[in-house]
Image (cartoon, grey):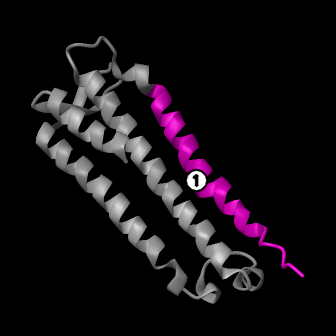
């Protein structure tokens, strides 16, 4: 969270009045926003991500296992506390992933749009692949744990 907040504040302070968000094949800006619009957009993403998903996490214990879209509901119903703990941790992983992607994206935008640095947009191609890998990890790999419910103790 601190990284995302720092990125939002830092990028607002270093960006020019117009910030390029989209680039053509030559690396020239093709879509621009004012730095205040980018600031408010980043703040909205940050607040929605952190507030809504954390609010959902707090309501997990109220949702019956029978209506949750998870595999092996019968087995998980016997271990609802472990299920709620896992789903809560998974939701926090989503929050963390979105915060990291937001922060790194803002740092990259500030670097590319800055006159101090000589980087161009193509120096940050790795960011899209890294973001995709992080999202696949959170949205695909972690939910596979739901296929292995806890073993009942005797």
Q: Mark 1 packing: few (<14 Cα in 10 Å), some, or many (20+)? A: some
Main secondary structure of the magenta stretch: helix
In the image, the segment drawn in magenta is 125-154
Q: Is residue 28 above or below residue 135?
A: above
- Residue 78 visible? The answer is yes
- Residue matched to label 1: 138
Q: Nearer the viewer, residue 31 or 116?
A: 116
Determine the residue positioned at 54% across, 82% down. 61
The image quadrant that residue 52 belongs to is bottom left
Q: Is residue 73 above or below residue 135?
A: below
The image quadrant that residue 107 belongs to is top left
Determine the residue positioned at 52% across, 55% down. 93
Q: Position of residue 95 (x, y in %)?
A: 44, 55
Q: Position of residue 36 (x, y in %)?
A: 12, 42
Please identify the residue farthest to the right as the structure is shown.
154
Q: Is residue 137 magenta?
A: yes
Q: Nearer the viewer, residue 11 or 62?
A: 62
In the figure, is residue 96 to the left or right of 32? right
Q: Position of residue 138 (x, y in %)?
A: 58, 53
Q: Secondary structure at mark 1?
A: helix
């Amino acid at each position: 969270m601190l990284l995302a907040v720092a990125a939002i504040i830092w990028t607002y302070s270093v960006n020019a009045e117009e910030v390029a968000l989209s680039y053509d094949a030559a690396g020239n800006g093709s879509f621009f926003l004012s730095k205040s619009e980018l600031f408010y957009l980043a703040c909205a993403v940050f607040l929605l991500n952190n507030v809504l998903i954390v609010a959902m996490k707090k309501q997990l214990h109220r949702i019956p296992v029978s209506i949750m879209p998870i595999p092996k509901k019968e087995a998980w119903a016997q271990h609802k506390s472990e299920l709620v703990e896992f789903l809560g941790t998974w939701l926090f992983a989503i929050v963390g992933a979105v915060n990291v992607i937001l922060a790194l994206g803002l740092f990259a935008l500030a670097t590319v749009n800055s006159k101090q640095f000589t980087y161009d947009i193509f120096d940050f191609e790795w960011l899209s692949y890294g973001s995709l890998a992080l999202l696949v990890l959170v949205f695909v790999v972690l939910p596979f744990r739901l296929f292995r419910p806890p073993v009942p103790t005797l």
